[in-house]
Image (cartoon, rainbow, N blue to C red):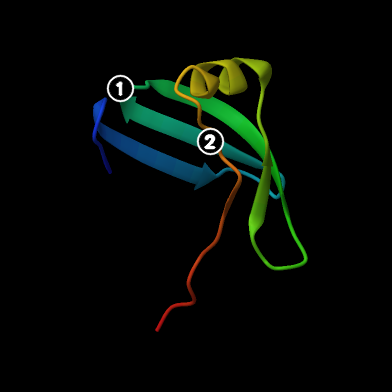
Amino acid sequence: MELPVIGEQHFGLSITSDREAQLTLQGAIDLDEPIYYNVGSDGKLEFTLSETTNRILGRLGTTLLHAGARPAS
C-alpha cells in the first residue's frame, strides 16, 4: 500500500488461534502485536486492539476496523 504522505506500508495479518491473530506492519509504522478478533454476523473479522496498538495507529489517525476473506475460486 502506498500512502501519499508517509510512503510505503506493508500489512500482514496471520490468524494464530480461534480468537487471536498477529498484526504486522512494516514501513512508516512498524508493529508486530497480537490482536484479538471475533467473526461478526456479516462474516467479517472484528478486532480488539491493545492500548499499544491503538496508540501507535492513532498517531497517524488510523485504526483497524475489520477484515474479510474472499472464497477461493
Q: Residue at x 26, y 27 (%)?
A: 5
Q: Residue at x 70, y 50 (%)?
A: 18
Q: Amino acid at mark 2?
A: Gln
Q: Is residue 50 left or right of residue 61?
A: right
Looking at the rendering, in which quadrant would you find the N terminus?
A: top left
- In terms of image quadrants, where is residue 30? top left
Q: Residue furthest right?
A: 41
At label 1, counting other C-alpha atoms closer than 10 Å, the crowd grade (few under 14, some 14-19, many 20 or more) is: some
Please name the residue that numbered disc 2 is placed on.
22
Q: Is residue 42 left or right of residue 16?
A: right
Please name the residue that numbered disc 1 is placed on.
28
Q: Nearer the viewer, residue 25 or 7?
A: 7
Name which of mark 1 and mark 2 comes first in the sequence: 2
Q: Position of residue 61 (x, y in %)?
A: 50, 26
Q: Nearer the viewer, residue 5 or 38?
A: 5
Q: Nearer the viewer, mark 1 or mark 2?
A: 1
Q: Position of residue 7 (x, y in %)?
A: 22, 29
Q: Amino acid at mark 1?
A: Ala
Say which element carries label 1.
Answer: loop
> Is residue 34 depicted above or below 45 in this figure?
above
Q: Residue at x 71, y 68 (%)?
A: 42
Give the spatial CA distance, label 1 vs label 2: 18 Å
Q: Nearer the viewer, residue 44 or 36?
A: 44
Q: Residue at x 55, y 34 (%)?
A: 63
- In terms of image quadrants, where is residue 72? bottom left
Q: Is residue 34 left or right of residue 37?
A: left
Q: Nearer the viewer, residue 58 or 13?
A: 58
At label 2, counting other C-alpha atoms closer than 10 Å, the crowd grade (few under 14, some 14-19, many 20 or more) is: some
Say which element carries label 2.
Answer: strand
Q: Position of residue 46 (x, y in %)?
A: 68, 49
